[in-house]
């Protein structure tokens, strides 16, 4: 039987970084400006004074130390607090296509493949920079791939949902090789004026090449043993940005048109759901948690990952067992678990098992069990 194999992965990391202290300086300068400008209303009790942020809180609450971003200057300007990414002409590649190209080329190189070996591209991420033509079709053209492409959006779980679609396409014969690319520009939809969340996200792009097992050399890559998806509706992570916004001008520019979450509730509700989903998925594959050598978890919060890994294993996981990239990248939405997999899959022996697991808005959870070939 034809099975799906992850034969290569790639990562594009924007060169610019912002550490917590720099981000907090910009936020606190904005807070001072706001409180000064609204001093009279604050004095009369008509407006609440904004509270400053702190680098110590950010690292302790999340494990994040810095993040890579497409544009530093716009985010750090207290009068702007938003990346500055100039529009491009229709004849230039889009930013997401450019990021995708870099990550896809690395995945192809790692797999020892040319673009001509690939027949499908899935761009899977939280935010597309335009509705159409699909970013995936632009990327397909830029790579010179003859085949088909489509975009997928399931927030933080986009890449694992894309992985299932790719594995299904390969196993049912509708494609021989599929690229799943996740160009996440999270800074574009992060409210850098919101103290509760201004530190959460960073930008990055990952690519995964999924191929038919009979075309991949023994010992290369990872067998996809199975995929499992789970969704459960929740408003606790929400963004009301969309094409109908222009139909009610009063909402344009309001905070709900950016990322908003009830972080505590998300933590409490999603952590057990993720652990249960991984355990049930393992059981369906006749596997036990102790069979796992590695867990490449979604990277939203360090404490959350430690809790999930502990619930799955029944003991604390070591940093080798559940690698962390949050400190360097922050939450890069669907790219996070794939970055962890890309950077931390060395040292595994043939037959070793691991799980790539994403979770986030929706709620949505994607679990992919893999075995080193
Ligand atoms: N500086 C200082 N203090 C602060 C700050 C700050 N910046 N922010 C909050 N505080 C204070 C609060 O006021 C509170 O004070 P008090 O106790 O006096 O009320 C105290 O710190 C504790 O606040 P919280 O309870 O809110 O803090 P937590 O310990 O819960 O940490 C986190 C907050 C880090 C947000 C945490 O709850 C968390 O990470 N939760 C999980 C969230 C998660 O996994 N979300 C997934 C979302 S990602 C996703 O699905 C992608 C969607 C699409 C992305 C699109 C791109 C943008």
Image: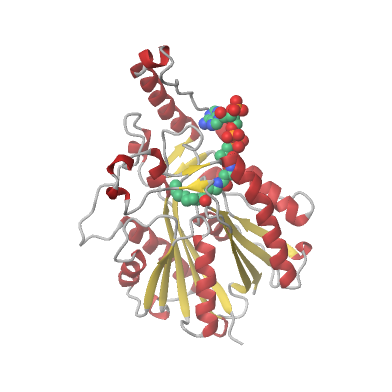
- Tell me which residue sits at (62%, 68%) in the image: 228
Front-most of 25 and 173? Answer: 173
Residue, x 45% and y 34% (percent of image)?
194
- 11 versus 21 height, above or below: below
Q: Is residue 77 left or right of residue 321?
A: left
Task: Give how far across and how far down residue 239 sits, in percent.
Answer: 43, 48
Please identify the quadrant where the C terminus is shown: bottom right
Residue 16 visible in the current orientation:
no
Q: Quadrant of residue 44?
A: top left
Visible residue check, residue 254: yes
Looking at the picture, how far across and down is residue 53, in whole percent? 50, 27
The x and y percentages for residue 348 are 67, 65
Q: Residue furthest bottom?
A: 1
- Residue in the image at 33% along x and 37% along y: 74
Image quadrant of ligand 1 equals top right
Q: How is the image coloured?
A: secondary structure
Vertical position of residue 320 compared to residue 291: above or below:
above
> Number of numbered discs present?
0
Q: Where is residue 217 in the image (x, y as percent from the top left)?
A: 57, 81
In this rendering, the answer to whether 368 lies above or below 178 is above
Residue nearer the viewer, 251 or 32: 251
From the viewer's perspective, tell me whether residue 336 is left or right of residue 105: right
Give the quadrant of the N terminus. bottom right
């Amino acid at each position: 039987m034809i099975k799906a194999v992850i034969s290569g992965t790639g990562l594009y990391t924007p060169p610019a970084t912002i550490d917590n202290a720099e981000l907090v300086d910009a936020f606190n300068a904005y807070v001072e400006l706001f409180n000064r400008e609204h001093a009279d209303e604050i004095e009369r009790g008509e407006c609440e004074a904004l509270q400053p942020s702190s680098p110590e809180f950010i690292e302790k609450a999340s494990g994040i130390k810095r993040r890579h971003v497409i544009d530093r200057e716009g985010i750090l300007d207290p009068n702007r607090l938003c990346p500055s990414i100039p529009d491009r002409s229709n004849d230039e590649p889009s930013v997401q296509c450019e990021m995708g190209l870099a990550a896809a080329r690395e995945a192809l190189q790692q797999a020892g493949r040319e673009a001509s070996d690939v027949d499908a591209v899935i761009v899977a991420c939280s935010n597309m920079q335009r509705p159409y033509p699909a970013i995936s079709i632009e990327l397909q053209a830029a790579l010179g791939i003859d085949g088909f492409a489509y975009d997928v959006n399931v927030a933080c779980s986009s890449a694992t949902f894309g992985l299932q679609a790719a594995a299904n396409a390969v196993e049912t014969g509708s494609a021989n090789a599929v690229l799943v690319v996740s160009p996440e520009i999270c800074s574009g939809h992060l409210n850098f004026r919101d103290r509760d969340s201004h530190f959460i996200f960073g930008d990055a792009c990952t690519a995964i090449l999924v191929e038919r097992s009979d075309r991949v050399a023994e010992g290369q890559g990872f067998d996809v043993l199975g995929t499992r998806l789970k969704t459960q509706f929740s408003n606790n992570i929400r963004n009301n940005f969309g094409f109908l916004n222009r139909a009610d001008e009063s909402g344009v520019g309001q905070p709900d048109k950016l990322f908003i979450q009830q972080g505590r509730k998300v933590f409490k509700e999603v952590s057990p759901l993720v652990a249960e989903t991984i355990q049930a998925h393992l059981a369906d594959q006749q596997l036990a948690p102790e069979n796992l050598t590695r867990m490449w978890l979604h990277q939203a919060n360090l404490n959350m990952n430690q809790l999930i890994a502990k619930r799955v294993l029944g003991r604390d996981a070591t940093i080798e067992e559940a690698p962390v990239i949050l400190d360097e990248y922050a939450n890069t939405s669907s790219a996070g678990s794939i970055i962890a997999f890309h950077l931390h899959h060395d040292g595994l022996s043939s037959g070793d098992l691991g799980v790539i697991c994403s979770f986030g808005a929706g709620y949505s959870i994607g679990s992919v069990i893999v075995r080193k070939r």
